[in-house]
Image (cartoon, rainbow, N blue to C red):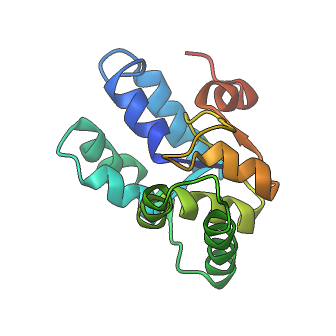
Amino acid sequence: MYVLDSSVFIQAGRSYYAFDLAPGFWNALIQHAQAGKVRSIDRVEEEINRGNDELKKWAQQHFHPYFESTKQGIVIDAYTEVIEWAHHQTQFTAEAKDEFNHNADAWVIAYAKAKKGTVVSQEVYNPAVRRRIPIPNVCKALGVKCIDTFQMLRDLGVKL
């Protein structure tokens, strides 16, 4: 199962897979979600809903059933592990840790870890970063597979 981070939806919707240019991308997400291969989480849905754009409308109309709840014991346990790892890293600034506490990233990782899924994010691994905690850095440290959107599409055999 692929667990999609906010960046997958937001970057695609605002640039390379804009709704008017690549409806096949959005249809593929729904198709693979219906097949149980693609999911996201409630916290990502909340981030998407902060916007007032076509992505919000699409998510509410088409993808809403595939945003899973993070209010599950195994997910909360994994979230605790993710947050504890982040806060024990001296590399990251206090502001980076605070931001990590308040966005969906730690929850996406926790959900994937708990459900043995693969995180899909457009963030890039960066071992030298201090001002932000990138999803791929955490995934690598905690043994959670992390790939980008394009690798997920290849893995799923999507042709646009």
Q: Is residue 20 above or below residue 99?
A: above
Instruction: Check the image and name the residue furthest to the left.
Output: 52
The residue located at (35%, 48%) in the rendering is 59
> What is the quadrant of residue 72 in the picture?
bottom right
Left or right side of 61 for 137: right
The residue located at (20%, 39%) in the rendering is 53
In the foreground, 59 or 120: 120
Q: Is residue 85 above or below residue 61?
A: below
Instruction: Check the image and name the residue furthest to the bottom.
Output: 73
Q: How many marks?
A: 0
Q: Tell me where residue 13 appears, x and y as whole percent.
A: 35, 30
> What is the quadrant of residue 114 in the picture?
bottom right
Left or right side of 154 for 25: left
Whether residue 118 appears in this view of the structure is no
Q: Quarter holding the C terminus?
A: top right
> What is the quadrant of residue 81 in the picture?
bottom right
Q: Is residue 47 above or below residue 8?
A: below
Left or right side of 82 for 133: left
Q: Tell me where residue 50 appears, x and y as whole percent.
A: 24, 53
Left or right side of 31 for 147: right
Q: Tell me where residue 45 appears, x and y as whole percent.
A: 38, 57
The residue located at (40%, 23%) in the rendering is 23
In the foreground, 9 or 124: 124
Whether residue 53 appears in this view of the structure is yes
The residue located at (72%, 51%) in the rendering is 139
